[in-house]
Image (cartoon, rainbow, N blue to C red):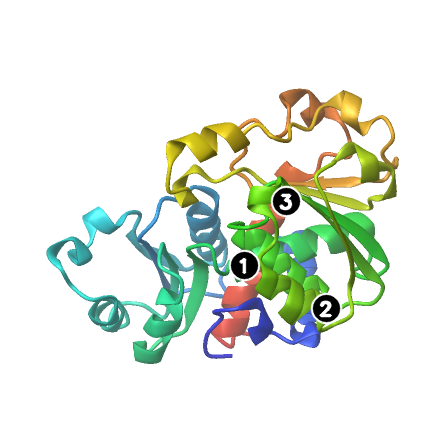
Amino acid sequence: MKNLIDIKDLSTQEIQELIEVAKDIMQHPQNYVEKCKHKKLATLFFEPSTRTRLSFEAAMMELGGNVIGFSSASSSSTAKGESVSDTIRTIGCYSDIIAMRHPKEGAPLVASIKSTVPIINAGDGGHNHPTQTLTDLLTISCEKQRLNNLTIGLCGDLKFGRTVHSLITAMSRYENIKFILISPEELKIPEYVKKEILEKHQIQYIETTSLEEHMKDLDILYMTRVQKERFFNEEDYVRLKDYYILNNSKLTTAKQDLCIMHPLPRVNEISTEVDDDPRAKYFNQVRYGKYIRMALILKMLEIK
């Protein structure tokens, strides 16, 4: 596989293979400590990130490889006006694989056309975030022991949330999946996601503004933050940012084996009191992210 720009670039079989490798890494980490010896990963982050960038870096280091790169556009030559294409062609001279985050939708795709080494999209604007989706799929597989027969509640910013769009795209390929789409009117799921994914694949879904109403039906609750950086004005953000806050009282009707997920960073959409609930899996999710990225790096560098 040359590049990973969109979760659709992977078949369900390839996803399953990555999940199996990630689980094997978790069980037998000693078998992988030198798999990427003398290989270099470049992390090109034109937009701030904590988890994704450090997760990629930790993944490569635990495989015995090295990491180069930058964590903001201001510390790269793009601040001088260099094009993304030229940056990518330059970095390809120094590295074996590139993980790239960019605020503009489609930038990693453009980069992949010019790149001489594999490109992993580490998030492009409100568009795609395929490695977060792989993290989510590994989390669901580990915590629920299946990727089918699930009712998934997606709550919060469904309009700009790239993690939500990618997860819907991925899960729509599995059997007997139902989505409960919980958001304020202003942050509803985009029409193209409904038409091109949910309706095209005949996936059951309900749109609602109430989190409590459907809590008892959920196998997975995927909370998201309202993203300040995607809003054009402060007023709208302030009005919507605290629309949903998950706390213990809202979980009283939830299933005992509910899996609560969040791509993080969290602001205040999940109360810290929920952290002690055994159903809270969002910090497990962070850990799974490192292992699935290790599996992906191995696959893209064609290392057995």
> In the image, is 236 to the left or to the right of 286?
left
Give the answer, above or below, for where 89 lies relative to 152.
below
The secondary structure type at the circle numbered 1 is helix
At label 1, which amino acid type do we have? Thr
Q: Are marks 2 and 1 in contact (CB under 8 Å)?
A: no
Among numbered discs 1 and 3, the one appearing first in the sequence: 1
Q: Amino acid at mark 3?
A: Gln
Q: Position of residue 241 (x, y in %)?
A: 53, 31
For image coordinates 63% across by 29% down, the residue present is 270
Lower position in the chain sequence, tag 2 or tag 3: 2
Q: Is residue 59 above or below residue 156?
A: below
- Judged from the image, the secondary structure of the residue bearing numbered disc 2 is helix
Residue 296 locus on image (x, y percent): 54, 65
| Mark 2 surroundings within 10 Å by alpha-carbon count, few (fewer than 14), some (14 through 19), many (20 or more) | some
**Is disc 3 placed on a helix, strand or loop?**
helix
The disc label shown at residue 285, or none: 3
Residue 288 makes an appearance in the image: yes
The residue type indicated by label 2 comes to Glu
The mark that comes first in sequence, 2 or 1, is 1
> Are the two marked residues, 2 and 3, in contact with CB atoms closer than 8 angstroms?
no
**Residue positioned 36% across, 57% down in the render:** 66
Q: Give the quadrant of residue 194.
A: bottom right
Residue 177, quarter of the rendered image: bottom right
Q: CA distance from mark 2 to mark 3?
A: 29 Å
Residue 131's tag is 1
Between marks 2 and 3 in the image, the one whose residue lies nearer the viewer: 2
